Image: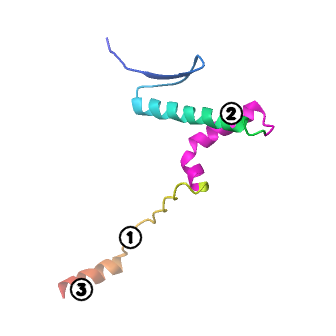
Amino acid sequence: MAVETRYVVVRNGEELLSTTDKKQADEYDKMLDMADSLFDLMGNSGLEIDESLQEKLSVYLAENKDDVLVALGAKKAKPKQKPKAVATEPEVEQDQQQEAA
């Protein structure tokens, strides 16, 4: 008989995630906490937003928190890495000739 450890994220009696990866479950739970906070923030804004849209937007913002922080200026954007240039054969031959000299 096999024993398997499962981590289950439950909100309001509803199972939202079941995984064997504790880190993934913790990250998902933290994201849901952020979404709840954002939902409350938007609810207190005085804006007339449909509750369903408010929930979707709060989850979207929580899932994309790094991009939101960059947009707010609270975090610097990660520089995009350029792929390393691949030496062409003439360059390789030229390098070998220079090393031999």
Residue type for callout 2:
Glu
Residue under circle 3?
98
Residue type for callout 3:
Gln
**C-alpha distance separating marks 3 and 2:** 64 Å
Instruction: Return the x and y of residue 2 as percentages of the image width and height.
Output: 32, 15
Residue under circle 1?
86
Sequence-earlier tag: 3 or 2: 2
SS majority, magenta: helix
Query: Relative to the observer, which residue lies in front, 92 or 41?
Result: 41
Q: Is residue 41 above or below residue 21?
A: below
The C terminus, quarter of image: bottom left
The secondary structure type at the circle numbered 1 is loop
Instruction: Return the x and y of residue 92 as percentages of the image width and height.
Output: 30, 77
- Numbered range of the magenta stretch: 47-70
Instruction: Return the x and y of residue 96 as percentages of the image width and height.
Output: 24, 80
Proximity of marks 1 and 3: CB atoms separated by less than 8 Å? no
Sequence-earlier tag: 1 or 3: 1
Query: Relative to the observer, which residue lies in front, 70 or 19?
Result: 70
Q: Is residue 80 above or below residue 50?
A: below
Residue type for callout 1:
Val
Please report the residue visible at 21 percent of the width from the left and 83 percent of the height from the top: 99
Query: Relative to the observer, which residue lies in front, 76 or 16?
Result: 76
Task: Check residue 55 in the rendering and tell me which mark sits there, or answer none.
Answer: 2
**What residue occupies the far bottom of the structure in this picture?**
101
Q: Is residue 96 above or below residue 76?
A: below
Proximity of marks 1 and 2: CB atoms separated by less than 8 Å? no
The secondary structure type at the circle numbered 2 is helix
Instruction: Return the x and y of residue 91 as percentages of the image width and height.
Output: 34, 80
